[in-house]
Amino acid sequence: MVNTDDIIKIVKDTGLKHIAVIMDGNRRWAKEKNLPSAIGHKKGVDSLRAITKSCLKFGIKYLTVYAFSTENWKRTTEEVNFLMELLSATIKSEISSFIKNDIKLTFIGNRENLNKEIIKILEYGEKVTDKCSSLNLQIAFNYGSRQEITDAVKRICTEVQKGKIQIENITETEISNNLYTKNIPNPDLLIRTGGEKRISNYLLWQCAYTEIYITETFWPDFDENSFSMAIEDFNKRQRRYGK
């Protein structure tokens, strides 16, 4: 078991501010236990709750989690509908806890093709936690990084057409400011559970120099001790940023 004080010191000494997570393995976890995939997704919510509390305990200011990708629409209608209902139910049940624990909730992703009721719930969660600041929790929902970058390019092109920006003034900073994650620092550490060795169209621009940690542990089994091990591993890295 990792000592909490040691993790707090690592976070402080390394300047670890932002952790991104690909929460993978809910369905495989359920399959191993001969359970419906819905049970795996529900257990995954418990893990997110636990890791959110760990971030508050350790002093991590930003946590971004991959909840539903643009590719996830290819799953069965039954599973997609369940995930939408689970999101709605989770926001409603957890919102008082977010406010109590000073957690700011932000949803990143494309909302154009989402159900109006889902959009209302997302906006409600963001509105009532807008003044919170102890932890910034970004939930990537209907998110795809290529789509995000495409949308950013379109916005910048529109500004060029209007004469508000010159082509020669388009910089990396300008592009970053047109992403869903504007005003959010790039992740220091990306954790992927479930053992897959890919980043699955997640934060492609933002993770250019992010340290990556992959664990075989399925997301429903990922707890504070697992999280601490990832932070300890991060502490062993030498971040050179190409130097």
Image (tube, rainbow, N blue to C red):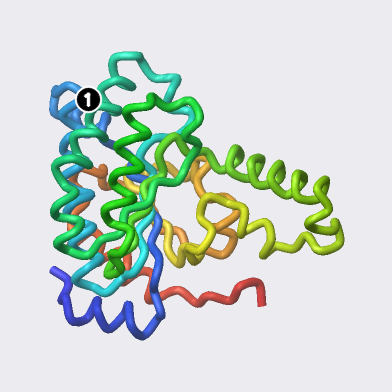
The amino acid sitting under disc 1 is Ser
Where residue 195 appears, as percent x and y from the top left, is 36, 44
Taking the image as shown, residue 6 lies to the left or right of residue 113, namely left
Extreme top residue here?
A: 77
Q: Which quarter of the rendered picture does the C terminus lie within?
A: bottom right
Where residue 184 appears, as percent x and y from the top left, is 48, 63
Q: For residue 28, say whether it is visible.
A: yes
Q: Quadrant of residue 115?
A: top left
* x 20%, y 42%: residue: 45
Taking the image as shown, residue 163 lies to the left or right of residue 79, namely right
Q: In this orientation, which residue lies closer to the viewer: 149 or 29?
A: 149
Mark 1 element type: helix
* For residue 57, above or below residue 78: below
For label 1, the residue is 37
Q: Which quarter of the rendered picture does the N terminus lie within?
A: bottom left
Taking the image as shown, residue 138 lies to the left or right of residue 38, namely right
Q: In this orientation, which residue lies closer to the viewer: 190 or 172?
A: 172
Q: Quadrant of residue 177?
A: bottom right
Where residue 48 appears, as percent x and y from the top left, is 23, 49
How packed mark 1 is, by other alpha carbons closer than 10 Å (few <14, some 14-19, many 20 or more), is some
* x 75%, y 63%: residue: 171
Q: In this orientation, which residue lies closer to the viewer: 64 or 170?
A: 170
Looking at the image, how many numbered discs can be counted on the residues? 1
Q: In this orientation, which residue lies closer to the viewer: 78 or 105?
A: 105
* x 85%, y 56%: residue: 167
* x 47%, y 39%: residue: 143
Q: For residue 21, say whether it is visible.
A: no
